Image (cartoon, rainbow, N blue to C red):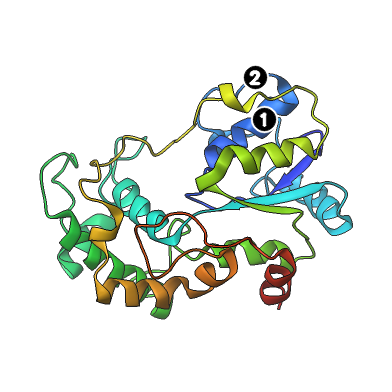
Amino acid sequence: MTESESVVYRVVPKCACSTIGQIMFYSDHGEFFDGDIHDSKDRMHKWAQEHSQPLIEKNVQAHNSYAFTCVRNPYTRVLSSFFDKVCGIQRNGKRYRGNLVPQLVQKYGIEVGGDDGKQEFDQIASFRRFLLFVRDTIRWRRPMDPDIHWSAMSGHVSTFIVNGGRYDKIFYTETFNDGMQDVLDSIETRHKVDLANIPRFNESEGHGPKRLHPVEDYFDDLSKHLVWEIYKRDFQLFKYDFENPGNKFPISEIDLDEVHAKLGD
């Protein structure tokens, strides 16, 4: 939530969350946060900051501010998680989550491009093995709990509803400027935001190897079956095209009433 309480955003990892956070920060302060917005400790309210919790809770439950979130095609989101988090070296110069990658190499036979993530490897075979691991974490919480970057978006989106919130807008990463502009048009900001000139803050950009193939090449029949098992609700609620992994765009509009009804249990 912005410090001015102009707007509330439910973060969904891997869905333009760094850019959205920086836009919110700029709309209050007329400058971007110097560094990764996820590292900010003040000038913006976050649930992870104890002093922010009562303020966010009060605002959300009374629906005092415009509330929104942003979603992304499940196929490209899980692919992006693989390249950024599993194959990539993180900002601190280390592998994501310490022993995660060695565990994946050992238990699932995944390759990640060597110690620096820059060597050639069979991206398609390794990604499909990664999908098995994702399914295992989500279905059986083994060999670890699911990670926020590849757990289903509907799970992230639902906690806001279950705790008394209501979304005014859910928009798509794929049509980011249109969706974000709708949000900005609906709120009062201290500083005007010109979306056309806002840089993209992708804190994971450049961490991992470049994707060498079109999205659809990574998903054979078995992979699609696994993706449906993991992300079925994401496809259904956010209207993405399950049949064609090559189509990153939604096939119809999100029905906000349906989202609140189905995720509010």
Q: Taking the image as drawn, is residue 227 in sight?
A: yes
**Residue in the picture at 67% in, 30% down:** 25
Q: Is residue 93 left or right of residue 20?
A: left
In the rendered view of the protein, which quadrant contains the N terminus?
A: top right
Question: Which amino acid type corresponds to the residue marked 1 in the rendered image?
Answer: Phe
Residue at the far front in the pictured view: 251
**Residue in the picture at 66% in, 65% down:** 159
Query: In the depicted view, which residue is nearer to us: 218 or 44?
Result: 218
Q: Which residue is mark 1?
A: 25
**Residue in the picture at 55% in, 72% down:** 236
**Residue in the picture at 12% in, 55% down:** 122
What is the x, y in percent for residue 35?
A: 51, 26
In the rendered view of the protein, which quadrant contains the C terminus?
A: bottom right
**Which one is earlier in the sequence, the residue at label 2 or at label 1?**
1
Q: Taking the image as drawn, is residue 33 in sight?
A: no
Query: In the depicted view, which residue is nearer to us: 104 or 253?
Result: 253
Q: Which residue is mark 2?
A: 31
Q: Are marks 2 and 1 in contact (CB under 8 Å)?
A: yes
What is the x, y in percent for residue 155?
A: 57, 67
Q: CA distance from mark 2 to mark 1?
A: 7 Å
Question: Which amino acid type corresponds to the residue marked 2 in the rendered image?
Answer: Glu
Query: In the depicted view, which residue is nearer to us: 90 or 175?
Result: 175
Indicate whether 151 appears above or below 101.
Answer: below
What is the x, y in percent for residue 94?
A: 29, 41
What is the x, y in percent for residue 82?
A: 31, 54
- Which element carries disc 2, helix, strand or loop? loop
Q: Is residue 35 left or right of residue 150?
A: right
Q: Is residue 252 left or right of residue 86?
A: right
Q: Is residue 151 left or right of residue 265?
A: left
- Which element carries disc 1, helix, strand or loop? helix
Indicate whether 69 appears above or below 3.
Answer: below
